Image: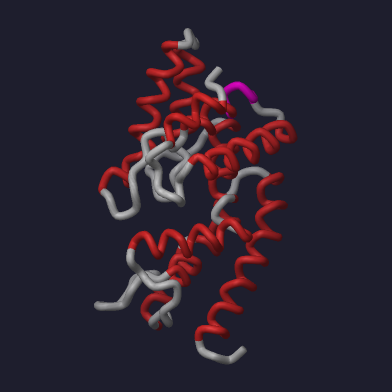
Amino acid sequence: MPTIEQARTWHTNADPVHDFDHVLRVHNLAVYIAGIEGADLEIVRAAALLHDAKGAAPGEAGRLKHHLASAEFAGEVLANQAWSPEKIAAVQHCIRAHRFRGGEKPTSLEARILFDADKLDVLGAIGAARVIAYASLAGTPWYAPPSTTFLQTGKEEPGEPHSAYHEHLFKLRRVVERLHTQTARSLANARLAYLDGYFEQLIAEWNGVR
């Protein structure tokens, strides 16, 4: 089984949004959800520790395929630890299916739990910090008024920036409906309420209202 100490070495060059602190939070959430939902803890733990092992900084093309690179890397790590081909395949499926905009859907309970744990980390106080950090790393504003086109279609008008608030509307507010386990949904509702309130306050302060 990969250890937390071993996993830490795989994330020394990660960006602040996908660093080892994120991995550790996802690991702890996944283990908590797995204990309630009755999943295979060994598969869940390994997948959580390896799911971002081969990431890339925001804006780099590699970030779009980090789930595939991380799954391949996981296969190498677990094969060296004498895991069975079946368990390696189960972990790799979890990793390939954890991406919000990825093409592979989580079909196993363990994959659904990793997906849910990863998505919970974009909500709540941590979610607020991460979406602002991501915008700063990407060189986009924290807030810009979304156009009517964006509100209706999710696509920006020419020249319209994709601010942190745009990301909140486009992705973060939709996370709860994409979650698979009841345990994760119960955690997500409170976190989303906090995040909604955060952006309401941010916009008010941005406009000098309070």
Applied colour scheme: secondary structure
Instruction: Looking at the picture, tell me which residue is in the foreground, 108 or 120.
Output: 120
x, y percentage for residue 200? 59, 78
The residue at the point 39 percent across, 69 percent down is: 154
Examine the structure image and report whether residue 59 is included in the region drawn in magenta: no
Position above or below: 59 against 28: below
Along the horizontal axis of the image, is 102 left or right of 187?
left
Instruction: Looking at the picture, tell me which residue is in the foreground, 202 or 43.
Output: 202
Residue 170: which quarter of the image?
bottom left
Q: Residue furthest right?
A: 36
Q: For the magenta stretch, what is the residue range?
A: 40-44
Count of numbered circles on the image: 0
Q: Residue furthest bottom?
A: 209
x, y percentage for residue 145? 43, 82
Examine the structure image and report whether residue 43 is included in the region drawn in magenta: yes
Along the horizontal axis of the image, is 111 left or right of 16?
right
The residue at the point 42 percent across, 37 percent down is: 12
The residue at the point 64 percent across, 73 percent down is: 197
The residue at the point 51 percent across, 29 percent down is: 47
Quadrant including the C terminus: bottom right
x, y percentage for residue 140? 35, 69
x, y percentage for residue 173? 55, 64
